[in-house]
Image (spheres, coloured by chain):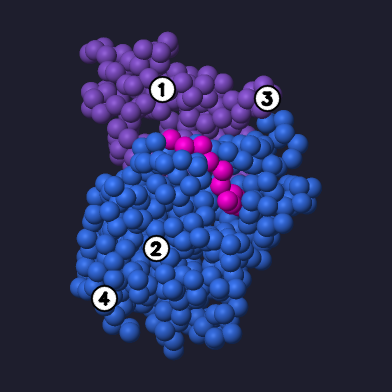
Chain colours: A blue, B purple
Amino acid sequence: MGKTFSEKILGLKAQKEVQAGEVVTVSPDYILSHDNSAAIIKEFRKLGVKDVMSTQKLVIILDHVVPAALEKYALNHKIIREFVSAQKIQNFFDIPSGICHQVFSENGFALPGKLILGADSHTTSYGAFGAFAAGIGRSEVATLWATDEIWLRVPETIKIEIEGELPAGVYAKDVILKIIGEEGADRANYKAVEFTGEAVKKFSLASRLVLANMAAEMGAKNGYFEPDEETLRWLKGRAKDKFKVISSDPDARYEAVLNYNISSLEPQVACPHTVDNVKPISEAEGKEFHQAVIGTCTNGRLEDLEIAARVLKGKKVHPNVRALIIPASRQEYLHALKKGILEILAEAGCVILNPGCGPCLGAHQGVLAPGEVALSTANRNFKGRMGSREAQIYLASPATVAASSIEGKITDPRKFL
Amino acid sequence: MKKGRVWKYGDNVNTDVIFPGKYTYSILEPEEMSRHALEDLDPGFAQKVKPGDVIVAGRNFGCGSSREQAATCLKYAGVQAVVARSFARIFFRNAINQGLPVLQSEEAVESIEDGEEIEIDFIRGKIKTARGDFAFSPFPESVMGILEAGGLIPYTKKKLEGK
């Protein structure tokens, strides 16, 4: 019997043959943390260890509340900068850089066959490059800094085969929302998800990142795409280290194989207050809203901003809507700037914010008042997430959010393309 | 063994409603965290919860963000354990790493009602209610070690000192 990607990579790291269900002790290749590094430093100090064991493995990226919106955030950032300097941590990205998952990827840490653990649930994103990447908690990261060791359970794997062609006006975001809506928020709990099929092989890396990122919203431990020529082309000149592609065996054992054909997929919308409350656009159309968000680790890349600009070019944002644009990173911001995309969006009346997590987690840059409704390209719509618990959050693709911003209500983007 | 009142909730109780994101980087003290426990799910909870109380919930408890404060705030609010049909992966690890026992039992969740008093026997793996007992598999030794030490940090500290 063959092995899945997850069985192979965790076996390689544990230096033994393993199969799903076993618990292994492993040492990761990279350990990611962000603004929560301040809290991790606090836990790390309690361990009575002076120095981080493998500083070259740490990647620290400030993104959650940047620049600091309150003195408390500023103090956290200061504690982190001092620690980075004292421990001589090389892979530190201060506030100009952007959202950790985009910055981590752009800088070539997200590599095929690497084991990456991060103090963020959307660490699953790096599966887009064929890495094993999972979210963990603060205590675990602090412990990893001190001991370079962690236990992981080898997950069972669900294979999702996606066939067909994306229709015009329908994007990777619609595909993953459809899957989560069908399968539910805990379908992949504790499990790995492999995305495969002819359709996803044609996806850009930016689009693959959308699926791997939101695998977390099905409860997945990690998502995975088999690296191909497109992956290797993307990594050329970026890869921070040597790497080896690891793929599932053709006769690997899967917990389930799910089939999706996307050829007749409509744009999808996740309605309040769970990500699996997904409806086709025809059932969500007409809902008025107050704030649009195009950005986040799910959909803030150049590809997303380009789609938004195509829809909004020569148009105006509805007077009842505040449309916020948050490029995922400084690199994506610069690309969009040089291509005139930010100009188009600003002309349309959008607010262009600095790269970062923005209002996605309700800390700053556009939080919601009671009774307000947001339409966002983010990955979560939980109650209270963007501010008031009496606000509502709808999730959709950048095209749907852009088209809806013109109309002031949830709108099918296909009539603007 | 301590008796505790049950606070019963539904499926998919996410970490945002357990501990809102807006506090994640501004509140660092566990006692202060506990004052916001379950704020966006049950705003009265933090004032009314008593030491030893138990949360009973449906599927996928703790889904969403990896924020460990979701476990920390419940522990410092005095919650003795969370019993659920299932737990989201990261929350499950975080809870154990904070020294907060998380127990899985379909039958117990099915039977137990909001407001009733229950007892938990961690050694024998039993949830005791007025209508009878429900078994859960006792924790493996390694997990019990972390729980007994009060969480992963004190557990690791002890281990490092022993080296």
Q: Secondary structure at mark 2?
A: loop
Q: Residue at x 33, y 60 (%)?
A: A195
Q: CA distance from mark 2 to mark 1?
A: 36 Å
> On screen, B12 above or below A276?
above
> What segment is highlighted magenta in the picture?
A23-34
Q: Residue at x 41, y 28 (%)?
A: B102
Q: Secondary structure at mark 4?
A: loop
Residue toward you, A370 or A286: A286
Pointer 3 or 1: first along the chain: 1
Which residue is labeled 4 in the image?
A165
Specify whether residue A263 is painted magenta: no
Which residue is labeled 1 in the image?
B139
Q: Closer to the camera: disc 4 or disc 2?
A: 2
Residue at mark 4 shares a chain with residue at mark 3: no
Q: Is residue B90 visible?
A: no
Mark 4 chain: A
Which residue is labeled 3 in the image?
B163
Q: Closer to the camera: disc 2 or disc 1?
A: 2
Q: Secondary structure at mark 3?
A: loop
Q: Closer to the camera: disc 3 or disc 1?
A: 3
